[in-house]
Amino acid sequence: MSRTVFLRNSFMVLLCVLSCKKKEESPVPYYNTPDFTPYFLSKAEASEKITHRIGIFSFTDEDYKIITDKTVDHKIHIANFIFTSCRSICPTMIQNLSLVDQKYRNDPDVLLLSFSVTPWIDTSPKLKAFKESHKITNPNWHFLTGSKGEIYKLARKSYFAEEDLGFTRDSTEFLHTEHIILADRNKKIRGIYNGTLQTDIEQLIRDIAILKEE
């Protein structure tokens, strides 16, 4: 074998290896830190390198049902943070999330969790009325209330809901964010989206479809 042929064949092998590796990597990134640096990894690589997961939680939904971290085990879930008296970003987020609802309302493997950031006001009956007023009938879309401290801690430390800024804030500071977080079946963060932008929600829907195939 000539040196030219050898080099060419070696180059082709290298291209094949790189191509195969690229195919293994998910087009939906993983996030491990509140600065949301994306990591495009294979599932095997992610199991070793991505250590952050959504933590333990337990809250009550609009039907007085207890929703915990076990509820989302092996399911894809979307989290956002709202309050029923909000007149700014929350109505837009709910309206845009209705696109996700339309696509996945009959899919038990896709859950939506809307955490109230004024849980001392947003009781289960109030959240139920809020859900009904927005004509949301999806049983897999839960509106959650509970301890303010626990919700704020979960939002900032687990979901990185306010990115770097929120991660360093005192837990008593009011939480108000347009961010929507996507977590996979292993409770690893796979996306952050601006809930006031329909284009971001359309990307969220595409990303959910990819995660369903993983």
Image (spheres, rainbow, N blue to C red):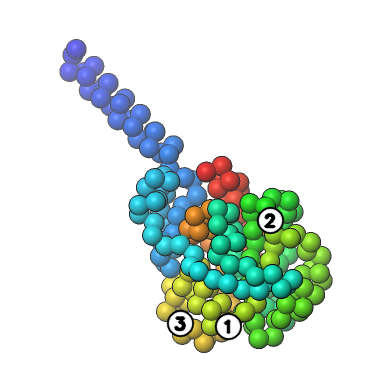
Q: Is residue 89 left or right of residue 185?
A: right
What's the distance in space between the residues labelled 2 and 3, CA to CA?
A: 30 Å
Closest to the camera, between mark 1 and mark 3, is 1
In this rendering, does residue 5 appear at all? yes
**Which element carries disc 1, helix, strand or loop?**
helix
Crowd tier of the residue under label 3, counting other residues whose Cα lies within 10 Å: few below 14, some 14–19, many 20 or above: some
Label disc, if present, on residue 169 of the rendered structure: 3
Q: Residue at x 50, y 69 (%)?
A: 56
How far is the residue under mark 2 from the one under mark 1? 27 Å
Q: Earlier in the sequence, mark 2 or mark 1?
A: 2
The answer to which of marks 1 and 3 sits earlier in the sequence is 1
Residue lying at the far top in this picture: please name it: 1
Residue 49 horizontal/vertical position (percent) = 35, 54
- Mark 2 near mark 3, Cβ–Cβ under 8 Å? no
Separation of disc 1 and disc 3 at Cα? 15 Å
Residue 98 lies, in percent from the top left, at 73, 60
Find numbered disc 3 in the image and state the secondary structure of the residue it sits on.
loop
Of the pair 89 and 67, the residue shown nearer to us: 67
Residue receiving disc 1: 148
Q: Secondary structure at mark 2?
A: helix
Q: Which residue is mark 2?
A: 100
For the N terminus, the image quarter is top left
- Kindly report which numbered mark, 2 or 1, lies closer to the viewer in this rendering: 1
For the point 30% across and 26% down, the residue is 13
Q: Measured along the vertical axis of the image, is residue 114 above or below residue 44? A: below
Q: Is 120 on the left-hand or right-hand side of 210?
A: right
Dot 2 amino acid type: Val
Q: Do we see residue 178 in this rendering?
A: no
